[in-house]
Image (cartoon, helix red, strand yellow):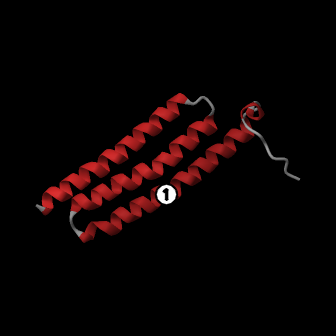
Amino acid sequence: MIEWFRFILTAVLLALGVGSILLSLLGVFRFRFVMNRMHCAAITDSLGALCIVAALAVAAGSWSYLPKLGLILVFLWVGSPLSSHLVSRLEISTDETVSEHMEEEDTP
C-alpha cells in the first residue's frame, strides 16, 4: 500500500515538474525580447527543479540520497539567478534598441 502511495506521489511530482518546464519552453519560444524569455525560463525553472528533485527524493525511499538531492537543488537555485543576471547585464550593455522594449533608470 505504501509503495503505491510513493509511486503515485512520485508520478504527480514528476508530471508537475515536467509540465512546468514545458510551460517555460513555450514561453521562451513565444516571447521575442531576451529579457522576457529569460524571465519566463528562470521563474519556472525553479519550480520545475523543485518538483523533479522532490519526486526523486520520494522515489529513492532512502534518507541517504536527500543531502545529495538537496545540494543539487541548491546549486540549481544559486546558478539560475546568477546566469540570468549575467545575461541581462550583457543584453543591456550590448543592445542599442533596449529602450524600445523596457524602461531604463537613470543612474547618477
The front one of 93 and 22 is 22
Q: Residue furthest right?
A: 108
Dot 1 surroundings within 10 Å: few (below 14), some, or many (20 or more)?
some
Horizontally, residue 28 falls left or right of residue 63, namely right
Q: Residue at x 13, y 59 (%)?
A: 3
Residue pictured at 52% horizontal, 55% vertical: 79
Residue at (21%, 52%) from the top-left corner?
8
Q: Toward which corner of the image does residue 2 lie, by quadrant? A: bottom left
Specify whether 25 is left or right of 8: right
Q: Residue at x 54, y 41 (%)?
A: 40
Report which quarter residue 82 is drawn in.
bottom right
Q: Position of residue 7 (x, y in %)?
A: 19, 54
Residue 31 in the image: state x and y as whole percent: 57, 30
Number of labels in the image equals 1
Does residue 58 appear to the left or right of 79 in the view shown? left
Q: Amino acid at mark 1?
A: Trp
Residue under circle 1?
77
Report the quarter where the N terminus lies.
Answer: bottom left
Residue 67 placement (x, y as % from top left): 34, 69
Q: Nearer the viewer, residue 23 or 84?
A: 23
Q: Secondary structure at mark 1?
A: helix
Q: Position of residue 106 (x, y in %)?
A: 85, 47
Q: Is residue 34 left or right of residue 29?
A: right
Position of 85 relative to 102 (above/below): below
